[in-house]
Image (cartoon, grey):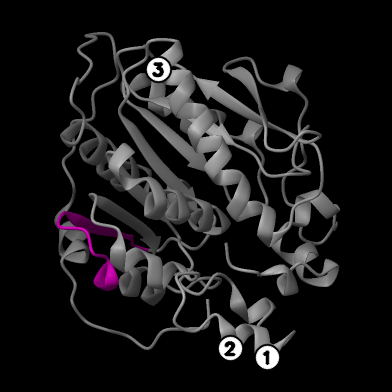
Amino acid sequence: MLDISFIDKEEILQRLFPLAFKIPEMNGMPSLSLSDSSHGEAYFVDVTDSIRICCKFWVDDKKSPSILYFHGNDEDALKQSHLATWCMQNGINLFVADYRGYGISDGAPTMTSLFQDCHVIFEYFKKTLKKEKYNPDIFVMGRSLGSMPAIEVAFAHQNDIKGLIVESGTGQNFNSLWKNSDPASVQNLTGTKFYNKDKIQDITIPTLFIHGDQDKLIPYQIGEMLYQLSGAKTKIIVLIPGAGHNDLIDIGDEDYFTALKQFVKKKTRKPASKTSRTKTTKTQTGKSKSSSTKTKRSKSSSD
């Protein structure tokens, strides 16, 4: 395990994990209690002897495939009801993992714990599916900050995963926030498999990238870079026209959900067959298809 403790300074962590530190100007979504969510079951994962992470599991059917989802830094596990509802309507189970200090999870988050806990959570989820006799097909998805644990899990466990989904993913792990804190330690990361942009090259399972083409926090060129670097034999990139960092579903819900549904269903061994589920009739638009085959390389930013 790489020593990245030099990143674990409070002034850096406050910006990486604002909800856990309750910074008003960055705290866009308040944490919720379990009673605030009418659907989904709470699962508590012991990541250490004294720290439990609260996760939420929205279940469509035990025969359906599941997505393990790592959310962005201004959300928590209980704030995913819209995505969860869509997943259940389309034959997909959704298991959302929190971070330390988020929602009702214990502890305080660090960059180190982010990369450690995601392995524990993945192993817990895999064992839970087996124990409770669920379809074993797992997709791992991460949005923004969550792209780091998602890519880490896919990098280490890709033989147990059907596919990876990266939404608004960072390439250099938000190093614009910490690259000047300890230049020697930052230099030591060169040539390692720490950054998303390096790990993605060794991930060969099917991968879907989704990004807004007006994203100011993590420019879409970063998504294109990750797509180009990806070692997956089957890879798709969907750029949502007009969407920024936090409004992909609001701006391009049909393209977003069509791409997600097609990706999961094509890679699932046991597609569900409920006739009552909502059907998506629009196929991926030509606009999205052309985005998925873009080969133009743009200058990347530090994120």
Determine whether 37 is above or below 174 in the image.
above
Highlighted range, magenta: 227-241
Secondary element type, mark 2: helix
Instruction: Work out how far the residue at label 3 is from the one at label 1, CA to CA, in angstroms.
Output: 45 Å
Residue in view at x 32 percent, y 57 percent? 209
Q: Please indicate whether residue 123 sits to the left or right of residue 242 in the image.
A: right
> How crowded is the residue under tag 3: few (<14 C-alpha within 10 Å), some, or many (20+)?
few
Mark 2 Cα-neighbour bin, 10 Å: few <14, some 14–19, many ≥20: few
x 73%, y 38%: residue: 48
- Which sits earlier in the primary sequence, circle 3 or circle 1? 3
Magenta stretch contains residue 230: yes
Q: Residue 130 carries which label?
A: 3
Specify the amino acid type for callout 2: Gln
Label placed on residue 183 = 1
Question: As drawn, is 95 to the left or to the right of 253?
Answer: right
- The residue under label 3 is which amino acid type? Lys
Name which of mark 3 and mark 2 comes first in the sequence: 3
- Quadrant in the picture for residue 196: bottom left
Q: Can residue 189 be seen in this view?
A: yes
Indicate the amino acid at tag 1.
Answer: Pro
User: Does 97 appear above or below 249?
Assistant: above
Q: In this view, does 275 lie to the left or right of 91?
A: left
Q: Measured from the top left, where is residue 198 in percent x and y?
A: 39, 72
Which class describes the residues within 10 Å of circle 1: few (<14), some (14-19), or many (20+)? few
Does the segment drawn in magenta span residue 24? no
Residue topped by disc 2: 187
Q: How far apart are marks 2 and 1 (CA)?
A: 6 Å
Q: Quadrant of the N terminus?
A: bottom right
The percent position of residue 137, horizontal first and vertical second, equals 30, 28
Q: Where is residue 42 drawn, in percent x and y?
A: 64, 20
Disc 2 + disc 1, Cβ < 8 Å:
yes
